[in-house]
Amino acid sequence: MGDVERQYALAGPCENGLRSLVGVSYSKRRFERLLFGPCSPFTGGVEVENCKFISCSTDSTFSVAHGVRMRHVLFDDVRAPDAMLVSSATVLQDVIIRGGKKAAALWCKPPSHGDVSDALLEWSKAEMANVKLAIDFSELSARDSEVVGIPLSKLRWNPEIHIPVSLSWRESAHWDELELSPRSFWRINLLRLQDFNCPEGVFTVPFPGDRNFDLKMDELARIEDAGILKR
């Protein structure tokens, strides 16, 4: 089986034991898909270790689904029609995601209620407890990245373009004084955290040219000046 076929074999559920990809580097390869899992670590897990994807692309899904274990993997300037979708119900260690403004954005989210078993969630939580750094996206300049469901202490980001947002903002004595609109970009991010039942997450700063860019940045400056945001 060739290296590309080995990557394709990691897609989707399988009950026939471990599928793995170890020590493989891809450069400027075009994939039909870049899909890892979903899988069950108890019956047919997926492990990816010491691999590199450099200047690769796909015309389809780019996803790390639940149940996957991924360690020491680099995604450098990978292009895709949509964002790189990462389930937080995984085990990630020293995964580096970087690239310019045209690279795929990073969307990391907890699975929807009922999509995974309680046992899988407990597996991910227990294994991630021993991880110091899950994802380093400090050199990812793509628009609209969001990382929710992994503790901020296990993430590395660029404070110039990524903002750590916390539900605790609303507990500040100064929050109501800001008089942000109900449709404020920053209020919406708090609602997203609430919807995911997560206390904190990292969101990308709006880019020049985005709708209501000046207002979003003015509100951000006010939040920071009030001492609510500490980068």
Image: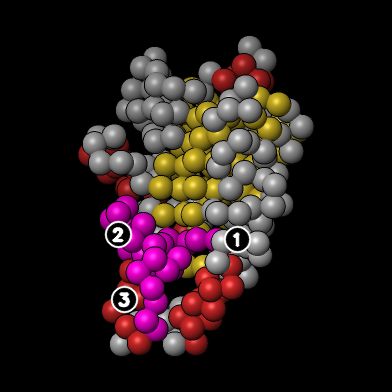
Q: CA distance from mark 3 to mark 1?
A: 25 Å
Q: Depth check: give the residue in front, 74 or 205.
A: 205
* Kind of residue at disc 2: Gln
- The label shown at residue 194 is 2
Residue 58 among those drawn in magenta: no
Dot 2: few (<14), some (14–19), or many (≥20) neighbours within 10 Å?
Answer: some
Q: Depth check: give the residue in front, 126 or 151.
A: 151
Provide residue 101's location: percent of width, then percent of height: 69, 52
Q: Does the rendering let one see residue 166? A: no
Dot 3: few (<14), some (14–19), or many (≥20) neighbours within 10 Å?
Answer: few
Apparent side of residue 110 relative to residue 105 in the rendered image (left or right)? left
* Kind of residue at disc 1: Asp
Local secondary structure at mark 3: helix
Q: Which residue is mark 3?
A: 170
* Kind of residue at disc 3: Arg
Instruction: Please name the residue shown 64% across and 29% down the image.
Output: 58
Q: CA distance from mark 3 to mark 2?
A: 12 Å
Provide residue 148's location: percent of width, then percent of height: 41, 54
First in sequence, mark 3 or 1: give its number. Answer: 3
Q: Which residue is mark 1?
A: 210
First in sequence, mark 2 or 1: give its number. Answer: 2
